[in-house]
Image (spheres, rainbow, N blue to C red):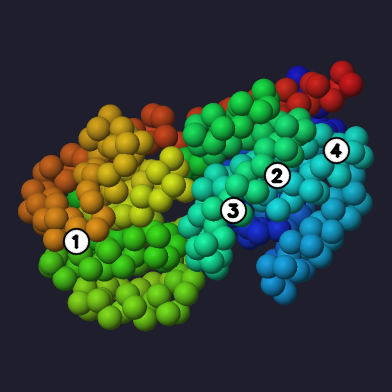
Amino acid sequence: MTDKSIKICHLTSVHPRYDTRIYYKQLLSLKQEFPNVQLIVADGLGDECTDGNVEIHDVGAPKNRFYRYYKTAIAIYEKAINIDADIYQFHDPELSRVGIKLQKQGKFVVYDVHEDLPRQILTKAYIPKVLRSVISWFAERKENKHAKQFGQIITATDFIWDRFKRINEHVVSVKNYPILATMQVDSNWNKKNQKLCYIGGLTEVRGIFEMVEVMQYVDAELHLVGAFDDERFRQKVMQSKGWERVIEHGYLDRGKVNHILEDSKIGFVLLHPTKNYVDALPVKMFEYMAAGIPFVVTDVPLWRQIVDENQSAVCVDPFNSKAVADVINALLADEEKAKAMGENGKIAVETKYNWEQESKKYLQVYRTLSEHLNKA
């Protein structure tokens, strides 16, 4: 039985307060059963109590990465101690030191592993290439050392689950599938236009340059929803011959994103097959499926397995622009096939790839922790 007096506090030094996984999925799910749910952030937007009745505490935006790693972490720890919660869940590897200190204060700590940090480091542009392997090795050793001590680990993928299961028996995989309730997209194919779309961050490793290159061979518009994190990279992309067919929207709210999806016939997922990505589950894949549109996706084993199982997309080589364009042109020409693939994806998300299913696992973790704390 859930103990409604249990106080829960989530911690992040990196993510925004309304991060989809943290706020809309996890915190609002917890509020269904636990009245006292709080969040500590470092975004400089101030304290607030949200419409979902979640208390948010802001320790201030950091001046730079170094400041965030040291000063912001200290501020988060001090705020966490003042809140005096029973369970703390942190979302950033750099807060593992905070998690260890909270455990020494007798608190129960949950580590939510969003990404495979050591493999992610190998793709970080701000780290000199010659140092990435060494830093990755040290980061993995440190993360594993801390992970052994935490009372519960939650992972966003099965690959990360497998890695941590070897060092901590209390590991649960809670995938980052879309929330069906927010994906109210009209999938009526007759209302769609000759448009393609990409929803997400506009970075080099996400294949933005490659998808714009594709557009020089496709008679359609590409709608980019997201923001470039590097102006130099943006200028490079703008030099592509395909840029004249691109509509750049920047960040859009959920309603406007859904409108773009309603209007589009095909989505892009041309992530570079880096070590950090090949075992990940790109949320945008499932968002396209939920919207009832087919997509082209980088051909890696995990994603091909999902595509083959659901017949909702076509796997491609992201670096062969002409071949990708041929696939897209074939789908645009065969609307019945494209429509059927979109319908297959929508059914798959409605039956298995959704947060409503994953939230059951997540809430069960906290029910178990609540019972454990009552017996302690």
Amino acid type of disc 1? Ser
Location of residue 286 by image quarter: top left
Question: Seen in the image, is 58 located left or right of residue 283?
Answer: right
Say which label, 2 or 4, has the lower sequence index.
Answer: 4
Q: Label for residue 321?
A: 1
* Circle 2: residue type: Lys
Label 3 to label 2: alpha-carbon separation = 13 Å
Residue 134's mark? 3
Hey, which quadrant is residue 206 in on the image? bottom left
Residue that carries the numbered disc 4 in the rendered image: 103
Q: Toward which corner of the image does residue 48 lie, by quadrant?
A: bottom right
Q: CA distance from mark 1 to mark 3?
A: 34 Å
| Mark 4 closeness class: few <14, some 14–19, many ≥20 residues within 10 Å | some
Mark 1 vs mark 2, foreground winner is 2
Q: Residues within 10 Å of mark 3 (few under 14, many from 20)?
A: few
Question: What is the secondary structure assignment of the residue under circle 1?
Answer: helix
Quadrant that contains the N terminus: top right
Using the image, determine if residue 90 lies above or below residue 263.
above
Q: Residue at x 81, y 21 (%)?
A: 372
Q: CA distance from mark 1 to mark 2?
A: 40 Å
Foreground mark, 2 or 4, reads: 2
1 or 2: tag closer to the N-terminus: 2
Q: Specify the amino acid type for callout 3.
A: Val
Is the C-beta separation of discs 3 and 2 under 8 Å? Answer: no
**Number of callouts:** 4
